[in-house]
């Protein structure tokens, strides 16, 4: 209810429980930790100090005044209200330029006249215009004074449903006159304190893209411009952001670890409280490449700078084809490149990008032994066959010795055809065969 009129718009009842509350916002007003500063202060107000009318309202509604400080950023120190009658509990309300509530606390005046509420400990910093208001929490009390001698169009009534009306819009319905006025609310402010904030990356990195660095409030600062220093108002929130992983030169990358105060996310919203340095900490990683055409090479990947990386291959491996069936093998011989060790498993210190290659050799030892045995067997068989034939015609059974010599001779010819024995060996064995058989069968 306004004044003494029972108007439809002017009569509202809203039961509310008011508690001290602080609402942080990303709009024009910021809240922070109080820091004592000795600064020149100024009180903002648009009334002439003389009350022409008083107002009271049902709980939940409020009277607001728009303030336009000359300072770019201001810190609210206190709010004063001219209490006319019926001192009672009410809420102090601060809103940003978008009319969003950013701070609220309860107050209880002890007498009529000017009543001040100290807000200096809350460090409410305002950027640009803002509103200060009295929010009624007790029905029809207290009464707030208004000056109508020099209206400025800065005073508003705000209903319980959040709708805003100008002073003339409401008074025209209450007393049916077109009158403007200023609520007697004053605010003491001081220039918002500023501190130095340094942003950097550590250790120094060399990204592949020169533009890579830190984004501060959405603006990129390349590594060549770091560290960068800002002078910011206490209580304001700013965002810092880095890429979680940054490419460097070939085989080099940088991985984000944390901010210098221990915060682990790459996107960081900081509230300015005091002079500080924020360092984005990265670790350097190098690429280990393990190269081998066979042997299931293990160990390729990114490794932390200074770490010991292990790599390996599996050896021996069978040779393909007939030779492999005879026991031919590929055998690991040694590593080349950034390591020259001879073990199938080895390690290397990652002080830069590394490449190791497995070198292999073919081992024919077992096939050679097998072929040797075959050749020797064939040779002996051929010799025996030749000697037996030298004794002249005779009946030979399938199980007889000359029959076996014929088989050996055939195997000898087969080995020659497949190229598994040299021509020299073949002729030598054949000559011996024909020379010695007659002598053995005489």
Image: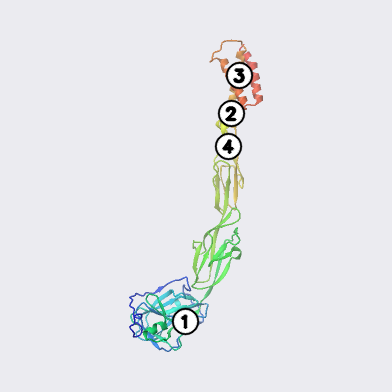
Q: Give the mark toward the camera: 1 or 4.
A: 1
Q: State how far apart marks 3 and 1 are (Cα).
A: 123 Å
Q: State how far apart marks 1 and 2 are (Cα).
A: 104 Å
Q: Which mark is residue 330?
A: 4
Helix, strand or loop at mark 3: helix
Identify the image quadrant of the C terminus.
Answer: top right
If you read the primary sequence from the N terminus, does the residue marked by circle 1 or circle 2 appear first? 1
Q: What residue is pinned by disc 1?
A: 188
If you read the primary sequence from the N terminus, does the residue marked by circle 1 or circle 4 appear first? 1
In this view, 160 is above or below 359 = below
Q: Residue at x 42, y 72 (%)?
A: 23
Q: Give the mark toward the camera: 2 or 4.
A: 4
User: Residue 1: percent from the left, percent from the top?
Assistant: 34, 82
If you read the primary sequence from the N terminus, does the residue marked by circle 4 or circle 3 appear first? 4
Of 140 and 391, which appears nearest the observer? 140
If you read the primary sequence from the N terminus, does the residue marked by circle 3 or circle 1 appear first? 1
Helix, strand or loop at mark 1: strand
If you read the primary sequence from the N terminus, does the residue marked by circle 2 or circle 4 appear first? 4
Packing grade of label 4 (10 A; few <14, some 14-19, many >=20) is some
Packing grade of label 3 (10 A; few <14, some 14-19, many >=20) is many
Q: Which mark is residue 382?
A: 3
């Amino acid at each position: 209810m306004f004044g003494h009129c029972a108007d439809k718009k002017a009569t509202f009842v809203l039961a509310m429980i008011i508690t001290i509350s602080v609402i942080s916002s990303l709009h024009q007003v910021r809240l922070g930790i109080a820091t004592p500063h000795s600064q020149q202060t100024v009180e903002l107000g648009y009334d002439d100090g003389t009350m022409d009318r008083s107002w009271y309202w049902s709980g939940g509604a409020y009277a607001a005044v728009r303030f336009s400080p000359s300072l770019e950023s201001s810190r609210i120190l206190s709010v004063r209200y001219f209490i006319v009658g019926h001192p009672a509990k009410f809420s102090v309300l601060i809103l940003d330029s978008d009319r969003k509530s950013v701070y609220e606390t309860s107050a209880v005046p002890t007498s009529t006249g000017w009543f001040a509420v100290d807000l200096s400990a809350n460090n409410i910093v305002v950027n640009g215009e803002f509103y200060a208001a009295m929010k009624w929490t007790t029905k029809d009390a207290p009464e707030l004074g208004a000056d109508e001698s020099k209206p400025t169009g800065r005073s508003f009534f705000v209903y319980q449903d959040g709708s805003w009306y100008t002073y003339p819009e409401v008074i025209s319905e209450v007393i049916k006159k077109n009158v403007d006025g200023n609520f007697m609310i004053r605010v003491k402010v001081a220039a918002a304190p500023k501190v130095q904030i340094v942003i950097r990356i550590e250790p120094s990195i060399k990204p592949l893209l020169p533009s890579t660095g830190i984004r501060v409030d959405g603006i990129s600062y390349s590594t060549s411009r770091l560290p960068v220093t800002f002078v910011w108002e206490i209580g304001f929130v700013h965002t810092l952001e880095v890429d979680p992983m940054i490419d460097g030169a070939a085989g080099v990358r940088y991985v984000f670890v944390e901010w210098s105060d221990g915060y682990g996310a790459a996107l960081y919203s900081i509230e300015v409280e005091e002079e500080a340095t924020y360092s984005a900490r990265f670790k350097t990683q190098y690429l280990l490449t393990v190269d081998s055409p066979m042997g299931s090479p293990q160990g390729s990947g990114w490794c932390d700078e200074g770490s010991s990386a292990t790599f390996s291959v599996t050896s021996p491996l069978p040779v393909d084809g007939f030779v492999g069936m005879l026991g031919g093998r590929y055998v690991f011989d040694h590593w080349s490149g950034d390591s020259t060790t001879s073990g199938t498993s080895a390690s290397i210190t990652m002080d830069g990008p590394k490449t190791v290659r497995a070198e292999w050799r073919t081992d024919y030892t077992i096939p050679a032994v097998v072929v040797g045995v075959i050749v020797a067997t064939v040779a002996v068989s051929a010799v025996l066959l030749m000697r037996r034939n030298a004794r002249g015609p005779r009946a030979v059974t399938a199980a007889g010795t000359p029959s076996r010599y014929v088989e050996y001779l055939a195997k000898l010819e087969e080995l020659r055809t497949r190229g598994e024995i040299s021509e020299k060996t073949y002729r030598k064995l054949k000559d011996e065969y024909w020379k010695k058989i007659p002598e053995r069968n005489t």
